[in-house]
Amino acid sequence: MKIIQTENLTRTYAVGSSTVNALRGVSLAVEMGEFVALMGPSGSGKSTMMHLLGCLDTPSAGSYWLEERDVSKLSKDERAEVRNNRIGFIFQTFNLLPRLNALENIALPLLYGRHGGDVNKQASEALGRVGLKPRARHKPNELSGGERQRVAIARALVTSPALILADEPTGNLDSKTGAEIMRLLVELCAEGHTILMVTHDAKVASHAGRILQMQDGEIVEERSTDVTA
Amino acid sequence: MSPLNTLLTALRGISSNALRTTLTTLGIVIGVASVIATLALGNGARAAVNANFRFLGSDQVQIDQDLELKNGQMQAQGKTLTYEDGLNMPSAVPLVDRAEMTVSGSAKLRYGRQTDDINFQGTDAGALLTVISQGQVQPVGWPSNKPLTPKDFIGQGRFFTDAEVLAGDSVCVLGYQTALDLFEGDNPIGQTVWVNRKPCQVIGVLAELEALNVEDRINTRPNDGLFLPVSFAIQNLFDTEPWVTIIAHVTDESKMEEAKAEIATYLRQRHGIPKGPDGKYADDFHMTTKQDVLGAQQQSAATFSLLLTALAIVSLVVGGIGIMNVMLVSVSERTREIGVRMAVGARGRDVVAQFLLEAVLLSAGGGLLGIAVGILTVPIAASLNQGVALLDPNSVPLAFGVSLVTGLVFGLYPALRASQLDPIEALRYE
Ligand SMILES: Nc1ncnc2c1ncn2[C@@H]1O[C@H](COP(=O)(O)OP(=O)(O)OP(=O)(O)O)[C@@H](O)[C@H]1O
Ligand SMILES: [Mg+2]
């Protein structure tokens, strides 16, 4: 099944009287279980693409099917539901809530929408999956950068989403910690998760099965790598 | 998000900045306290009138002599309001079917070797309650909600009868303390005492009484007293015709104003009071009804209430704006948090619920504090309004409701603003 399929996906921003074409008709298909890296110079439209695929934004033109459902014309609340159920986000700056401990941060997506089951148990399992069980009661400022990103990954996993979107997940980490995070993502991919990741780092991108090169709002190059993870 | 989780989230939100939160609610505290005090004044006025005039029936007109200060003494102004004025009233005034007269003065009371300078009251048989109520008293320890009947005021023996009043019999009833002073524990009933050298048989002693108003209990002496048939008192204890107080019973409660007009016409005629050049009469008496007292009492409370209501409104608005302000600051400080919540699936209504609940919790906290302050304020309000203020139990839930509504109204805008944030912008916010 195609997790992602876009056709002519376009996003323009009006800035004053001029318009910025951040995305110029991108057509892309991602199969279930793929690990795709998105590369390209600053301003080439990578984040814009991630926002659209993550249903945080709606395209100016074109279509987007997530798990074969057209999600390009959903209302704000419908998009919130899609994000809650089907998508997990990993950010460069982690974006954990500072007043919640690790477990509570992970549980957050479970509190919105109807997930059922024991929230604490599910959050605990996700925390275990990223190897941070002993840090359950730690606040984000009591965790290292790598640990924070693990908590963020657990939060992205906890609802068992169809798609995990990571915008420069190693951008704020040193290379050793970054490598650990990449190992985790590769493992998750091997377990069947579909991952789309933005990175500037070719070494980081080399973990993906497919690398898309963007330029000026278009995908200009696409190549496969042979991964031996 | 479930209501419980929304509540927990909101509680966390406000507890993160306790000092700012507390200061913000100050306006609400004052506003809510004012609501409590305002209602206490209204309630107090009602209670005071009910207590002080619970014996002046709503079908009665009290007629008093106009007085003036002459040579250091209160004297009747114009013609004296006499016993006969009252006696003839029921037959001359169609709307009045009965009139009770009372008179008061001072006399020397003697029994054996004991003497006592005393203020006496001459009354009708039926006027016992009315007369005693002038002192606004009750038997000691009487429960405030228990109705009082005339016989509850009698400790020993009985009060005098209509027949004894008509005949001008020389009988009397003593106050509790007066009886103790004079008889030093002996049984006074049936004994003869001397009032200004006139013999008089004791037929009853009043129960031990206390002022209704707790503050008045130190400076009033309700147990000193001597009650005599009004006819006997007028004939024997005054050098000149004394003025009386008349309680006129009106046949139809709905015609109190007409009755007052009829009584005035009757008295003006008897006292020969001409119509002045300005069309008014220079009356030498004045009339009071329960409605009059109620009106005056409520007017005084109303003026005070108006001030407090204004204070309540102003401080609630100020408090509300304070809450709006602190919520706007909070929304902007937590923009990123809102972005994260939206990214993981919070819908607009989840965000509205979270911030609205925070605002309501803030104002509710202020409300609770305000209720406490308000309850403590009631005695102060009372002291500023002649003791007339009484906590109205209904005002507590009402004031709490007001604080909740304030939170809802002023929290709505910040909450809506939070919910309308763009998740991408919010996530990028520094
Ligand atoms: N809200 C916005 N309003 C106007 N222009 C925008 C907005 N967001 C992005 N852009 C423009 O769209 C283009 C693509 O931006 P985008 O953030 O997708 O780039 P990016 O590839 O993620 O860059 P980087 O590697 O620096 O993160 C840029 O030219 C940017 O200025
Ligand atoms: Mg970017």
Image (cartoon, rainbow, N blue to C red):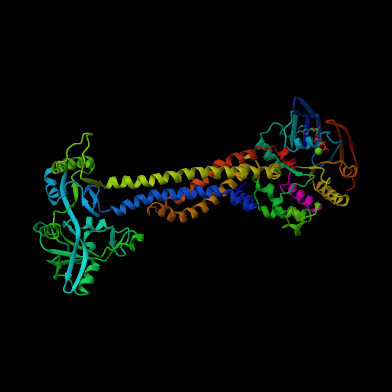
Magenta stretch: helix, strand or loop mostly: helix
- The residue depicted at 35 percent of the width and 44 percent of the height is B299
The image shows residue B14, relative to residue B219, as above or below, that is: above
Q: Taking the image as drawn, is residue B391 in sight? A: no
Q: Relative to B319, is A78 on the left or the right?
A: right
Residue A121 image point, x, y percent: 69, 55
Quadrant of image for the C terminus of chain B: top right
Residue A50 image point, x, y percent: 78, 37
Quadrant in which residue B191 is drawn? bottom left
Q: Relative to B22, is A51 on the left or the right?
A: right
Quadrant in which residue B322 is drawn? top right
Quadrant in which residue B163 is drawn? bottom left
- The residue depicted at 13 percent of the width and 55 percent of the height is B240
The image shows residue A18, relative to residue A113, as above or below, that is: above
Residue B120 image point, x, y percent: 20, 61
Taking the view exactly as shown, the residue that stands out farthest to the front is B71
The image shows residue B137, relative to residue B395, as above or below, that is: below
Of A65 and A100, the residue lying toward us: A100
Q: Which portion, as a residue range, is magenta?
A: A146-162
Taking the view exactly as shown, the residue that stands out farthest to the top is A17
Residue B160 image point, x, y percent: 15, 61
Of A186 and B174, the residue lying toward us: B174
Q: Taking the image as drawn, is residue B275 in sight? A: yes
Q: Is residue B291 magenta?
A: no
Q: Is residue A159 magenta?
A: yes
Of A169 and B88, the residue lying toward us: B88
Count of residue discs: 0
Q: Relative to B150, is B351 on the left or the right?
A: right
- The residue depicted at 29 percent of the width and 47 percent of the height is B293
**Quadrant of the rendered image holding ligand 1:** top right
